[in-house]
Image (cartoon, rainbow, N blue to C red):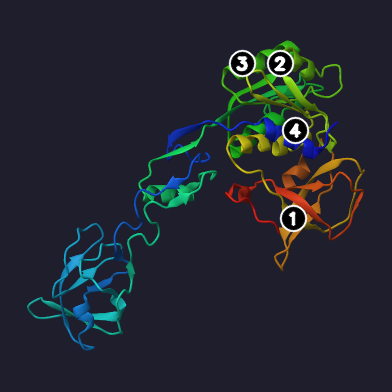
Amino acid sequence: MISFEQALAAVRQRAGLQPDVMLAADAALGHVLAEDCIATESLPGFDNAAMDGFALSDAHLALPPGTPMALHEVQAAGDARFTLGAAACRIMTGAVVPEGTATVVPVEDATVHTAADGSQTVVLTAPASAGMHIRRAGEDVQAGTRVLPAGTRLQPQHRMLLAALGMSEVRVRAPVLAAVLCTGAELVDDHAALADGQIRNSNGPYLRAALPAMGATVALYRRLPDSAAAYAEAVRTAEQAGCRIILSTGAVSMGVHDFVPDALRALGAEVVFHKLQMRPGKPTLFAVLPSGALLFGLPGNPMSCAVGACFFVQAALRQMQGLAPELPLRAVLQAPVRKKPGWTLIQKATLAVSDDAQLQLRVLAGQESFRIQPFAQANAWAVLPESDAELEVGRVLDCYPLQPALSEWPCGPASA
């Protein structure tokens, strides 16, 4: 057996970087940038009004307070630029400011007077100075500057920026295709009637839901009988389909039907590790197939499967997409925990924030690997170190949110 940390290092060492591809910006959402995005234009692209009001020149500002100023033009958003003359100009938010504009005075700081002949003048009711309420060209983004670094997983807020800059394509890491293979004659689909001795397949639906959030596309999903031949055929099919990550559940322990290790060796795979000093998930297996695809043999117990996916599969996918390893949050234990030394325990837990903004951690009851309901109540995994036997209140522990949004920051999440 090897340690939890050794297993993570072995996975990362063998997870090669995906090639880069050019995708349309809409199609690239959820994918990871393979190179820096450099702005090809400035934002805003021109000086424009920050408020509805009146565009005035330096000559207008030099007039004595209360002087009526002729009001002629109206400049709306989308109108072409013109040169401001002797008259002031009505201007709308976002409109390009006329040449010669010194300032924009908000509508609430001026009064418009209309003469009998329909001509208009405007009088300021508040002091005005040069440069007010004008958004300058390049004030947000200067052309030629980096706007998004490589390693950013593209989210809707990034799409807004790309659209504003006219960047319709981006270079990203190629999507990772994955296969999910669930072994076990006892498994039935979640909607089917159960015969005596059968159970519903919860691991398969969980992995199909979890993998896209990790950056993988599930290209193949199969439920398999307890057969080494059927398993080998499904692995070959996954490789032929271009799957670079293959997950199988079950048949990796010590029972008579636990055929996965021998089947993989028959396929020519390198079994990197099998059995860890970790609970749940001791029988977890990791292998590299002749095609270079990574295969994770996850135990059939639901929590063993979830731990293997959350820590080892996700570690491989982050490496393949050019993302830094996920950094743990640090939280203060709120109740004592006892454990057997010599094992790293990955425990279902809840994270909360105290009134003084301290991250607080509670390890949940019901840590057995078959118990799913506590997992549905959890929002984090707590990592209990291998060497410890007693962890007291106030101990600061590493923990990982089940939805690690902070880990998508290019710099990684901040520690508490």
Observer able to see residue 379 = no
The residue to which callout 3 is attached is 237
The foreground one among 357 and 120 is 357
Question: In the image shown, does 363 or 242 lie closer to the viewer?
Answer: 242
Q: Nearer the viewer, residue 83 or 250?
A: 83
Dot 4: few (<14), some (14–19), or many (≥20) neighbours within 10 Å? many
Q: Which residue is pictured at 28% across the width and 85% down the height?
A: 125
**Quarter of the figure with residue 76:** bottom left
Tag 2 and tag 4, C-beta contact below 8 Å: no
- Which residue, given by chain and number where applicable, does mark 1 sit on? 330
- Residue count near mark 2 (Cα–Cα under 10 Å), binned few <14, some 14–19, many ≥20: many
Disc 2 vs disc 3: Cβ atoms closer than 8 Å?
no
Q: Earlier in the sequence, mark 2 or mark 1?
A: 2
Find residue 169 and report its horizontal and vertical position in percent: 40, 39
Circle 3 packing at 10 Å, graded few (<14), some (14-19), many (20+), is: some
**Mark 2 and mark 1: span between their CA atoms?**
41 Å
Q: Amino acid type of disc 1? A: Arg
Mark 2 vs mark 3, CA separation in Å: 10 Å
